[in-house]
Image (tube, rainbow, N blue to C red):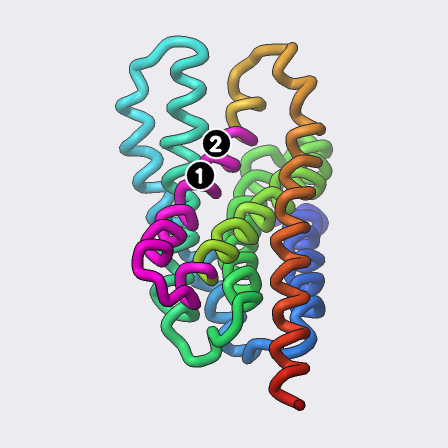
Amino acid sequence: MNTRLFIIAITPAIIGLGAIYLSDRHDREPLRILILTFLLGALAVVPSIIVEEILIRFNVFPGVAGALYNAFIVAGLTEEYFKRFMVLKVPFKTTYFNEKLDGIVYGVFSALGFATVENIIYVVFTYTNNPFVGLYRGIFSVPAHAVFGITMGYYLSLSKFDKDLSRKKKNMIMSLVLPVILHGGFDFILMANIPQLTLLFVPYVLFLWWINERKLSAFLYDSKSRIKKLKE
């Protein structure tokens, strides 16, 4: 294994993990739970690959329709389902998940666990001779997984802390549907082979960052306010 490529593959996720960990400065999550969530996210690659291999066999659609199927169903739905599943199985049920920001923190840790393994597969083993793959994925793909994790965690938290059963169910559904839509849109732009569509890629990525930065900022403020009230 090429050590240099391995370092290139894991560095973007390490930066993302450090950023979200340091952002949660008012009521930081236990490191052991965060590591476990990261590892579960990494483990989610296994069932995702299996399901994707099955689903891709049903892609009988030509051209753009086939790209839509691969982007939204094969990749988007499968990967976001299993990343979310890992959050729901462990951190969501713990007593440490006690404020809205926690959903985003655990969502990002699961997503970046997944992205780390996926990036190693692509950068270290699949496209070893292409030096630009690591750069491209480090700038776009790995951060995109983190962004999808923010969306997922945002709605998981809204669901967990809402006492209205109707809204709880709606937000639980949104915690899967919206990341799938965002993920599918990201992949479709790249898979569709439509030159005009690729012009929208960078604006779309900026849009993803903008809407999710607002979600993160809202919950950071909520966390700060909550701790301030507890100290009063």
Q: Amino acid at mark 1?
A: Val
Q: Nearer the viewer, residue 157 or 14?
A: 157
Tag 2 residue: 184
Bounds of the magenta segment = 158-186
Q: Are marks 2 and 1 in contact (CB under 8 Å)?
A: yes
Tag 1 residue: 180
- Within 10 angstroms of label 2, few (less than 14), some, or many (20 or more) residues? many
Residue 53, x across and y down, in percent: 33, 33
Residue at 72% across / 32% down in the picture? 132
Quadrant holding the C terminus: bottom right
Question: From the viewer's perspective, is residue 87 above or below residue 120?
Answer: below
Q: Amino acid at mark 2?
A: Gly
Question: From the viewer's perspective, is residue 39 above or below residue 46?
Answer: below
Residue at 30% across / 15% down in the picture? 60
Left/right placement of residue 75 relative to residue 197 reads left
Residue 70, x across and y down, in percent: 41, 26
Helix, strand or loop for disc 2? helix
Question: From the viewer's perspective, is residue 115 above or below residue 109?
Answer: above
Helix, strand or loop for disc 1? helix
Residue 6 visible in the shown view: no
Q: Nearer the viewer, residue 163 or 136?
A: 163
